[in-house]
Image: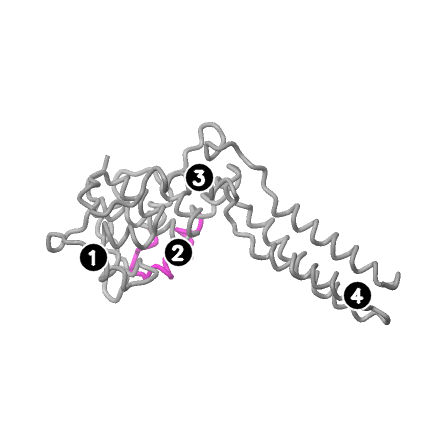
Amino acid sequence: MPTGTWWFIGAACGELLCAALLLHVRRIRSGGGPRGFEPSPQALAMLRGGPRAAVTVALVALHQRGAVAAGRKRTIRANGGPGRTPDPLQLGVHRALRRALPLRELVPRPEARRPLDALRADLGRAGLLRPPHRRRAARGVLWCVLPTVAAGLLVPGAGAAALAAGTAALLAAAVLLLVPPATPAARDLLAGLRERYPLPSHRSAVTDGRLVQLYVALYGDPALALFLPRFSRDGGLLDRPFEADGNQPSRRPGRDAGGVLP
């Protein structure tokens, strides 16, 4: 390999190292967070599926108190006051429902976005989510690998070894671009909770409303279809709407499970 091509290998390796350092989060103990940190169902949903999943769990909690209901055309509408809850995400989501909204429009509303950002920051401090600003910086650095490699391969005399090194650098950049927001500690936490709380086969086995929220946080659509099939289907909460019909358990007309709060 000509000595003139070594510079691009060093530059690409430096960019990859910088991105890896930005994406690195100190691994926390197996308890799931620092001492005193107990992730709520909404926080667990954020780890599993991001802001949409967290807002979905907040809507489930509000629906259990009768504060929201399914509206027309797969929307959610307010159905009274939010109840006596100190939870900022639930309060923000309820305030955002000055009119009926579909879930995709509810999530980015400022009233919901602010508590979502605060929740994301808490999870970042707990070592369970990679901070968004560091992920953005890492992506910016990783996109620089492509022009670096391209410039190196355009050097006269760059041969097979340079091509192999450039290909390896691009593959490493692609891998780092796909690193998820949740950290290994978060994935371990979710896996441990799913092992501890397997999704029941019948909704009648669960009468605790907060447990319903936990199942929705951990499993998403299957738990929504099991415990709240009518609300989740009519309110447009399901990522795959057909699941509510395919897995719909028997229920008394007009009612969903999970209305009993601890």
Q: Earlier in the sequence, mark 3 or mark 2?
A: 2
Q: CA distance from mark 3 to mark 1?
A: 29 Å
129 relative position to 84: left or right: right
Most extreme residue toward the left, as rendered? 253
Which segment is the magenta one?
95-114
Q: Give the secondary structure at mark 3.
A: helix
Rendered image: mark on residue 152: 4
Residue type at the position of mark 1: Gln
Residue 154: where, in percent of width, then height?
A: 80, 71
Point out the tag, 4 or 2, that comes first from the N-terminus: 2
Q: Quadrant of residue 36?
A: top left
Secondary structure of residue under mark 1: loop
Mark 3 and mark 1 residues within 8 Å of each other at the beta carbon: no
- Point 50% across, 47% down: residue: 182
- For mark 1, what is the residue? 248
| Residue lying at 15% horizontally and 52% vertically, measured from the top left | 255
> Which residue is under mark 2?
107
Q: CA distance from mark 2 to mark 1?
A: 26 Å
- Residue 196, horizontal then vertical, whole percent: 34, 37
Above or below, 47 against 156 in this view is above
Q: Amino acid at mark 4?
A: Gly
Residue 183 circle label: none
Q: Element type at marker 4?
A: helix
Q: Earlier in the sequence, mark 1 or mark 4?
A: 4
Find numbered disc 2 in the image and state the secondary structure of the residue it sits on. loop
Closest to the camera, between mark 3 and mark 2, is: 3
State if disc 4 and disc 3 touch (CB < 8 Å).
no
**In this figure, which residue is indicated by the disc labeled 3?**
189
- Mark 1 to mark 4 CA distance (whole Å): 58 Å
Q: CA distance from mark 3 to mark 4?
A: 43 Å
Position above or below: 100 against 226: below
